[in-house]
Image: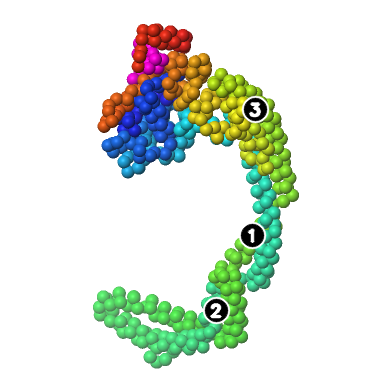
Amino acid sequence: MLRLLSVRNFVVVEALELELDGGLTVLTGETGAGKSILLDALALLLGDRFELRQLKPGAERAEIAAEFDVTQVAPAREWLDAQGFAEGDAALVRRTLDAQGKSRAWINGRPATLAQLDELGAMLVDLHGQHAHQSLLSAHAQRALLDAFAGASALARDVANAWRAWRAAAERRDRASEAAASSRAERELLQARAQDLAALATTPEEWSALGAAQSRLAHAASLIETAAMAEDALCGGEDAMTRRLSVLIARLAAGVAHDPALRDVLELLEPAQIQIDEAARALRSYRQKVDVDPAELARVEERLGAIHDMARKYRVRPDGLADLATETQARLEELAAATDIAALERAAAESEATYRKLGKELSARRTTAAVDLARRVSEAMQELAMPGGRLEIALRTLDAPQAHGLEAIEFEVASHPKQPLAPLSRVASGGELSRIALAIEVVTAELGDVPTLVFDEVDVGIGGTVAATVGRLLQTLGARRQVLCVTHLPQVAAFADAHFRVIKEGDDASVRTDVDRLGTTDRVEELARMLAGTAITAKTRAHAKELLQQHRRA
C-alpha cells in the first residue's frame, strides 16, 4: 500500500507530500489545477519515460519518492529479497531527473534500473487512465486474471511446468538424434586413429629412451675414443695421473715425520687416489660396453621417425601420443554407450501427453470461467454509463502449444450495442477504458494481489445516478484495496474515505500546485464548489452536506 508520495520540481509542483491511508482516496480541484500531475509523477516513479518538459521551469532537478508498505504483498517482498533490496516491510522508491535528461533511481537506498522500477511497480500499483501503464491491457495479465477467476492459477503453473518438462525431453531426444547422425563419421575417424596408435604402441618413456639411445649410437666411435684417452691419462702411461699422485703422496708421507701438520693435506689426497683408480676402471668398463652398431642405430632412428610421423599426423607432441590413445578410447566408449534414442522418444511422448492432459483440463476451466466473468463484467458495465456494452473473452487455439496453455486469451469489449467487439488494448477513450477496468476490478476484487489501484478520468462523460454508481463501486473496491481516484464529480468524491484538494496558485509568470487534505467542513465546501462552481449558496452547501452524509462509509 502506498503510504507517502513526495514530489519536488515536477511540472508545476514545487514541493508537496501526500500521506495516504487505505480505502478510497479522491483528488479533486478545478480544471487545470494539476490533479493528474500527481498520478503522472507516480507513473514516472514506477518506470515511465521522463520528458524534459516535465521538469519545473527554472529547476535543475526533479525528485519523486514514494514509500510503500509491503507487509501484505508477498510477491513484492520476495522480489525485493531476491534483488537485494529487502529492508523490513517497506519499499522506499526514489527517482531524480535533471535538466540534462539524466535519470537515476533507488529502491531502499540502493541504485536501481528503470526495468527494476517497472517490475516492482507492477506488483504494487495498477494505474488506470488514458496515460497510464495498465496491466489489464497485457495478454499475460488477462490470462492470469481469468485463471484466478477460474480458481486455476495452480493448474496453470502445473501446465507451465509440464510444458518445460516436455520441451526439455524433446530437446534431449533431438540432440541425441543429431548426435547419432554425426557420430557415425566421428566414430570411423576415432577407430582409425585408435588402430594407428595401438599399432604404434608407444609410451612417453620410450620417446625419451630412444632419443638418448640415438644420440649414444650416433656418437659411439667418438665416445670410445674419449673414454680411452681419459683412461690413459688417468693410469695408462709414465706420466699418468695415478703415478704422479702416488709419488706426491709418498713424499708428503715422508714429510709428515718431520712436520705432522702435513698429515691434513695427506688425508685429503689419499681418497683422491682411490677415486681416480675407480674412475679409470669405470672408463675401461664403459669402453668395453659401447659398441659401434650401425644396425641398431638404424632401428632406433626408424622407430623415432615412426613416432614423429604419427605425432605430426595427429598434431600432438611425440610424448603425448599415449595420452591421445587413452582419450581416443574413452571417446569411443562414450559413443558406444550413447543414450538410447528410443527411450528418449518414449520420455518425450510421455511428457507431451502429460502436458496435453493438463492443458485440456485448464482449457475446460478457462472456457467455463470466461463465460461467467464476461457476463458479470458486462452487467457491471451497464451501471457505468455503457448501456449495451459488453465484454467477451476470446479463447483461440494456438497452432503450437505454449507454456501458458493451448489457447491465446484476449479480452474484447464494445462500449455500446452498435460497436463491434475489439481488443481491450484498442479502446480509444480513456474514460471508457477506466470504467471497463473499474468493472473488471470490482468483479474480481477478491482475486488480485496488487494493493493499490489508481483511476484517472474514470468519470469522464457521466453524471447523476451513474456517477453515484461509480462512487459506490470505488468505495466497495476500497474496502479490499487502496484506491486513488482523480475525479471532478461530487457524487464520486462523496464516497471517499479521504479527500485531497489540488490547488493551483500564482500567475502566468509563476504557477505552483499544492495539495490540502480536507476535513469534514472543507469537504462540504469542496463538494459545494463541484456542484455549483463559483456561485456557492447555502442551498448548495446543504446539498453537499447531505451528499457527504449519505455516501460516507458507515
Q: Which residues are magenta?
A: 516-533
Residue 358 visible at all: no
Q: Left of 125 or right of it: where is 526?
A: left
Q: Amino acid at mark 2?
A: Ala
Q: Which residue is mark 2?
A: 213
Query: Along the line of sight, which residue is nearer the eye, 95 or 224?
Result: 95
Comparing 455 with 69, the one in front is 455
Q: Is residue 252 above or below residue 446?
A: below
Q: Secondary structure at mark 1?
A: helix
Q: CA distance from mark 2 to mark 3?
A: 89 Å
Does 165 sit above or below residue 288? above
Is residue 14 found inside the magenta-colored segment of the image? no
Residue 79 is left or right of residue 178, and the answer is left
Secondary structure of the residue carrying numbered label 2: helix
Examine the image and state in which quarter residue 179 appears: bottom right
Seen at 42% across and 85% down, the residue is 234
Amino acid type at circle 3 is Ala
Count neighbours of disc 3 (C-alpha within 10 A) and say few if under 14, some if 14 to 19, many if 20 or more: many
Which residue bears the numbered disc 1? Answer: 330
Residue 365 pos. (x, y %): 67, 28
On the image, the x and y values in percent for residue 384 come to 54, 21
Q: Which residue type does callout 1 highlight?
A: Ala
- Which of the two residues, 123 or 143, is positioned nearer the viewer here? 143
Quadrant housing residue 69: top left
| First along the sequence among labels 3 and 1 | 1
Magenta stretch: helix, strand or loop mostly: helix
Residue occupying the point 56% across, 68% down: 320
| Residue located beneath label 3 in the image | 370
State which mark lies toward you, 2 or 3: 3
Circle 3 sits in a helix, a strand or a loop, which is it? helix
Coloration mode = rainbow
